[in-house]
Amino acid sequence: MPRSPKPFSIANLRKDNPRFNPFDVLQRDVEEPEPGPERKPAAHKTALHFVWYGTGKPNDANTKTPKAIASGFASATVYFWCLPQMAPEFEKALGKRVKVHGLDEVLEAPVVRKELGALLLDKLDQLLAFYLANKGHAPAKDILTFLTLGVNGGYFLDANCIIEDRKQFEKMLAQPPKVPTFLKLEDSLTFNAKHPSFMKDELALQMGMEEDATDEMTELNGTDMWAMYAPSRHPMMWTIARHYIARAEAFGFCGAPVQPKSLRSQLRNSFVDAEFAQQKRTLAGALGIQSIFSGMVEHMRRHAQYRPEDVNWKVDSVKNGQVEGSGLALSPASSKADYWVEDLGITKGHGDSWTK
């Protein structure tokens, strides 16, 4: 019988076609899968915080700017911090784009307990109770802002700021500073970096000025506390918070019992008996300014390259809607503005203060 032809042979097929690949059959008549949707990286988000410590109802003065930023700037995540019992009202007034949180979340954060310790936390509780009992809602905002930025990082703005230059504001959201940054006013202050226990004179106690020729003095630009920035968990913010509580104790606002006729009692009484809210804000504002300066001084000692006069934001004054010296016209909403911050593209000071 004639022999049957040789069975299927890969070797013979390769002779005829050196590029033959027996696995090509797996690819025949197989449809290519449709390409999936192109995934773009998530947009960079920068936290922007507003702090409200009080029982005042939501109104345009304390909700307009947070809502405008949340709806108008995709690169910002806007947080509104308030007393827990006020959160439901502000959630309703601010809408879903603003994240409303209770300040208890900041005060109870593990990192706050770690950085301040039990003794300072006890004094902080006394201080906040003192402010609440004496209608010091606006002054209390400063220490709460320092702690909020220490925990979360990001920008803080007063709610009566207005965005004048959208491009500049977007730039500051996209490229935040690398270190805590504050406002830099034109005037400079000679600041005593010593612990406040050294101070004996009332004026020196309030303004942190020198007591004698041996005091260690540092000259820094004057500043204000209506805009600031800090990276999350930056050590300078904990330093500032510690100094604030220490100075509040020196003012008689917390800590040891206040002895009658002492300097502590004079300062405490000047806050308790103040007829106008602005007096309370001015006195407590000195605490915030001194505390910021103390944080700057300690950071300069640890990091020689840190120069607050270079990294802080320069502020120009505004008069009749014009930035003094440049002729730049601001929006009608800022006709009563007090300051202009070119680096941020914002002004401060529309209408009545939001802290009333």
Image (cartoon, rainbow, N blue to C red):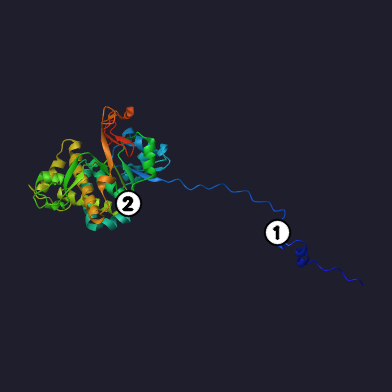
Left or right relative to 170: residue 23 = right
Residue 190, horizontal then vertical, whole percent: 16, 45
Towards the viewer: 186 or 261: 186
Q: State the SS at label 2.
A: helix
Q: CA distance from mark 2 to mark 1?
A: 57 Å
Q: Classify mark 1: residues with Cα within 10 Å, few (<14), some (14-19) or many (20+).
A: few
Which of the two discs, 2 and 1, labels the residue nearer the N terminus? 1
Residue 318, horizontal then vertical, whole percent: 26, 31
Q: How many marks?
A: 2
Residue 54 visible in the shown view: no
Left or right relative to 207: residue 113 = right
Residue 322, horizontal then vertical, whole percent: 28, 29
Residue 114 visible in the shown view: yes
- Looking at numbered disc 1 in the image, what kind of residue is underneath it? Leu
Towards the viewer: 177 or 83: 177
Left or right relative to 297: residue 46 = right
Q: State the SS at label 1.
A: helix
- Looking at numbered disc 2 in the image, what kind of residue is underneath it? Val
Q: Nearer the viewer, mark 2 or mark 1?
A: 1
- Which mark identifies residue 151? 2
Residue 347, image quadrant: top left
- Which mark identifies residue 26? 1
Q: Compared with residue 25, is residue 59 higher up or lower down, i.e. above or below?
A: above
Q: Classify mark 2: residues with Cα within 10 Å, few (<14), some (14-19) or many (20+).
A: many
